[in-house]
Amino acid sequence: MLTLGDLLDEDALGLRLLVGDAADRDRPVAGAHAIDVPQPSAWIDRDWLVLTAGTMLRDDEESVGKLVRELAETGVAALAFGIEPVFDHVPETLLDAARRAGLPVVVVPAHTPFREIVERVVRASLSEDVRASQRLVAMQRYLMDALGDEQPRMAAIERVAALVRGEVALLTRDGRVDVTTGIVPAAELWEAITARPQTTLELTCKGGTWIAVPVLRRDGAVLRWVVASSGQSGSVQLTKAAVQAAVPLLTGIDRLDATRRKQDRALRAVAFQGLLAGTADPLVAAQLTELGFAPEQPVAALVAVAGRGDDDALLSAVEEALDHARLPFVALQRGGRVVLLVQADEAEVERLAHGLAGGDGEPADAPATAIGVGGHGRLHGGVERSHREAELAVEHAGGGAPVVRFDALGTTTAILGEIPLAQVGARAEPLFERLARQPAALETLTAYFDHDLNVSTTAVHLHLHPNSLRYRLSRIEEAIGAPLRTPAVIAAVYLALRAGGHGTAGDR
């Protein structure tokens, strides 16, 4: 880049440095502008050479000091003062103010038109722009080659790191490190990012300079952040250019990933639906093989209730966990739930379920609030049963027990797992209808079974006197035409409640 020293060394221009030292000769000159208006900083940028003949200048300390301070705070390269036609010398008040502010002052002789200085700076700037464009094109080509890698996102940030000779990382939209080339001060960077507008940022962190640039979706929402240190190159401009060149590539990779994820979800959903239907379609078998399933290995079904009803976020968490564990799976979204089938041993299924339910973390932030786990069965022929078991188990999950395995349930519920609920409902419907005719009957019986047929504890729960509860139970016995003391009647009433959607906790 053109420097102030380059202009001073051109004999044809005849410029002399009146205020400044040898270090000021290295100041970059990005442009030049002749200006004689109040508040010139509104018209010029950092590293520009300000040319003035002093037309608007009043030779008093206050106005001169204000002008010099304004230019110094803007970060201009220097103030070039033209001799004649207004002043035959540079005013001493201006030179004194410039020395105090650390602003270089150059004198322009009368025979040098301002336009020659501007033309010289423009020629140098155009030449620099050409070189910068060539470097940018080469940089973009180098980064684009990352698309040919098996892991293009990682390859892209590694190439950025090679360009800037520093550390580079991708942060998720909540500040977690997604991919990194080394150790980065993620917490400190994220604190600085969230305190500023979502645009290209230049941050000082851990004694170094970092550039942060957001990767955006089509609707403008932030997907992730790219952060890079200026590293050994020490060039903030190079780091900024490299990161900004990488962002469109990373955006494209994200969009390709989103398309691939949609296609993958559709493929897994079709394969799962085929298994649930019990079809022996060769295409389904081929799809399962392609997804990594081994026909001879057992599988287990899980039904997970999404936290806050966000089954898309839950499915994403399932995909991330199982891809990381390299376990074959298929999944479906069903109205706030995710139903999945995974080929893994019992310990792996248990880890997966508890991980989705929050593990040892905060349950409120977990992707799933309740998970039911069915028993293991054959890939071809045992999926429907495992799914039915998981559906039954999830009805007992939640609260203090977010994960419930079917084999941990009681005998009656296990029997229900062997019989399709529709068949149970058909047999239990007449009894359920008789119970439903009494408004308090269903509530009373559900509580009665929940408290192990104990009149005292059930009465406390229902805020009734024990005798009032006994009266209610006698009315129920009249309605069903049988006493609530024999095992057969107890079993029939329990099944009627379960088939009618009034599950109890008593069989857990």
Image: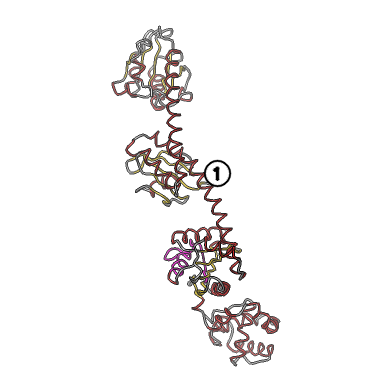
- What residue is shown at x 40% (from left), y 12% (from top)? 82
Residue 15 pos. (x, y %): 35, 13
In the image, 61 versus 36, the foreground residue is 36
What is the x, y in percent for residue 99? 32, 21
From this view, report whether residue 109 is shown above or below residue 383: above
- Does residue 356 belong to the magenta stretch? yes
Mark 1 — residue? 220
Please give the range of residues in magenta.
348-372
Position of 169 relative to 479 (above/below):
above
Residue at the image position 53 percent from the left and 67 percent from the top? 341
Q: Nearer the viewer, residue 218 or 290?
A: 290
The amino acid type of the residue labelled 1 equals Gly
Which residue ends up furthest to the front in the rendered image? 282
Classed neighbour count for the residue bearing mark 1: other residues with Cα under 10 Å, few (<14), some (14–19), many (≥20): few
Q: Position of residue 442 (x, y in %)?
A: 64, 80
Quarter in which the N terminus is drawn: top left
